[in-house]
Amino acid sequence: MKTARVRTVGGVPRIEVDGKPTRARLFWGGASASPVPIGAEREITFSFVAPLTTQTGTIHFRFGRELGKVGVRGVRIVEAGSGRVVLGAEPAWKVWPPTEESHVEFGAGGFVAHVVAPPPGKEWPDFHVFHEHQLKLTKGKIYQVSLSAEATPARSLTVALYQPGTSYTFLAGPSVQFESQVKLAAGVGVNIVSFEVALPWPAPGEPLDFQASDVACERVLAANPKALLLPRIGVYPPPHWLKSHPDDVMRWDDGDHGGGMASAASVAYQRDGAEHLSALVTHLEATFGERMIGYHPTGQNTGEWFWMDSWTGALPGYTACDRTAWDAWRAAQKLPPAPVPTPAERKAKTPSPTVVDFHRFLSETIADAALVMASAVRKASKGKKLSLLFYGYGFEFAPMPSGPANSGHYALHKLLTSPAVDIICGPFSYFERSIGGVGPVMSAAESVLAAGKLWLNEDDTRTYLAKERTFPGWDSGADTLEGTLGVLRRNLAQNACRNHATWWMDLPGTGWFDDPKLWEEIRRFAAWDDYFLAHPTPFKPEIALVLDETAAYQLSPNATQNAPLSATRKALGLVGAPYGQYLLTDVLAGTCPAKVLVVLTTSQRIALERRANGKVLVFVDEKGVTTEALRAACRAAKVHLYTQTDAVVFANEPLIAVHAVKDGPVTVTPRHGGKPVTLTLKKGETAWLL
């Protein structure tokens, strides 16, 4: 592979690999151990081939969140053939976290762990028992693991071996399902694979060690030699860096530093993070360049470039480097000096002008930090590979307890004008993603495409194969194969009609997509993806949902009051016609084709009314809006409604798709003189009309 970039053809951005259009359909996964159900005492055994040579391997045991006790005995690891005992009768166990809440009794060649709830107001810790970092493994050798375990009450036990480092590299565990999913994806023509790769960030004087990153790439290529690799790289400084840069470690309004997270405003973090990211990309290009299609640097909360813990109500911005960056930002804006607003000022019902400015500073600062990393990718790959970033969840964050602007996701315009990024990503909304939901998108996706970039929907919706209930969005998804297929079809159709990219995500790495039936559905739909590649068809919805980024800076930190703004997507999703999502700047520039503009809270109402040019305007404030009111506005504007009753419709003809929100008949009328078709659907079913 020489190049992989996004290019606009026929008004539609698309991925081209060496000039050849390529479906923007990916699998995202990672090697991880599947939980093992335990109750009465049982034997657990598994074997593995060591992916690397190590002198410091470790085995971990995690117990979930069910209160009770777990007993583990007789843990042994033996090298096949030689019989060498890697872990024998007197293991050196340790506990994390080492607090009085972590009750573990050791003895008789094993341990008993008591799972207790954390103190009120405290988050669940990553409670686990692990072996001293001294297990010796040789790359390519086969090892056999055996132990016995029991639990009261019954639960799942997770057993996994790791190589410690800046981040821990997974080595082995029972029922690893990553490779089988890579193979299933390849079988239906999905060869782009995204996965996590550790970022080497050694202490001064220590060498760079790329062994863990190489292992991650080799694991994918062993399962699919034709795979195109798109690693996700977390740009997080290790403890030694944080210790030596105390003024760059995040602090929130309560003075807490949260255990260690570099502020995105830190010049030192941006410089050093970009340096180590560049070194990794340069290495991967030299080692796997023909298979590398791009790179996805991540940072801050869950890697998605919004301020850490802002979703919890915590207010970022109280680190020394934040104050320095704030002073510099105000000077650049030709604003007089001002202190960082106090927590009380930021929690006020009506934000002051200084708080509004600080909200803008938070967004522009984190956008700039993300772009520093994207620029490092662009330079290290010599401008020849894709550069991706999470960002721009402007329609999702209205209900944040601290106010949406504290997320930092309201400077999407910076990414849209930057040559450093090709693809902007975000999950399908955590609201309305389940069976019968409207499947909203988080961002101004149509503005992203209008800027010549791709919007990618991360489809991390829980499938019926999910075993866990502790991940983000665990309470939404599907519990049956039938329900999973209905949601999958809905999301497939939306991506195709709106020209969006996607990856199907095995979020915890435990086999969410390890079923040929799911991939057969993806194979069936590939004909539509291929059609739109061969016949680029811009998505020109007659309805637009419009976001004014600057208005978000002025919203108060009232989740209940702001939530209706985010819920507008549900009301629109049931109207009976597709809608697009735009930034207000595109609407004011006259590049939005819609007849009906549904505008979230804005200070530019007069400017919009002057430029309406016959468009119907619906202004939405904290009171929200109903589907009935929106449908009436659409009829007034002569918008074609595919259905006259509540249903989720995606259309970019000749493709029309309907997702049922209730049981019963749905009558669909094609746009260009086609005969009405009445479908009898169950809630959660998705029908494709050709």
Image: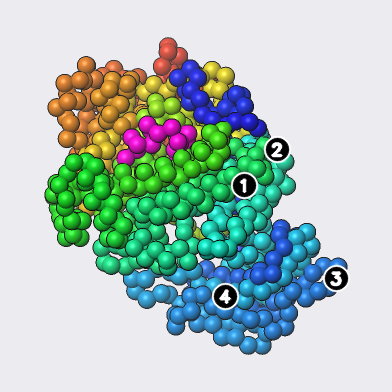
Closer to the camera, 67 or 444? 444
Residue 313 shows in the view: no
Give the CA separation, mark 2 to mark 4: 39 Å
Residue 236: image tag: none
Q: Please tell me which residue is depicted at 52% across the width and 80% down the height of the picture.
A: 114
Name the kind of residue labelled 3 in the image: Ser
Q: Residue placed farthest to the top in the image?
A: 673
SS at mark 3? loop
Q: How far across and down, in percent of the image, does residue 194 sit?
A: 58, 44
Residue under circle 3? 82
Residue 10 shows in the view: yes
Residue 129: image tag: 4
Range drawn in magenta:
411-427
Name the kind of residue labelled 2 in the image: Lys
* Of the image marks 1 and 3, the number of the one nearer the N terminus: 3
SS at mark 2? loop
Closer to the camera, 622 or 661? 622
Name the kind of residue labelled 4 in the image: Val
Give the CA separation, mark 1 to mark 4: 34 Å
For mark 2, does the 10 Å Cα neighbourhood hold few (<14), some (14 to 19), or many (20 or more) residues? few
Q: Which of marks 1 and 2 is in front?
A: 1
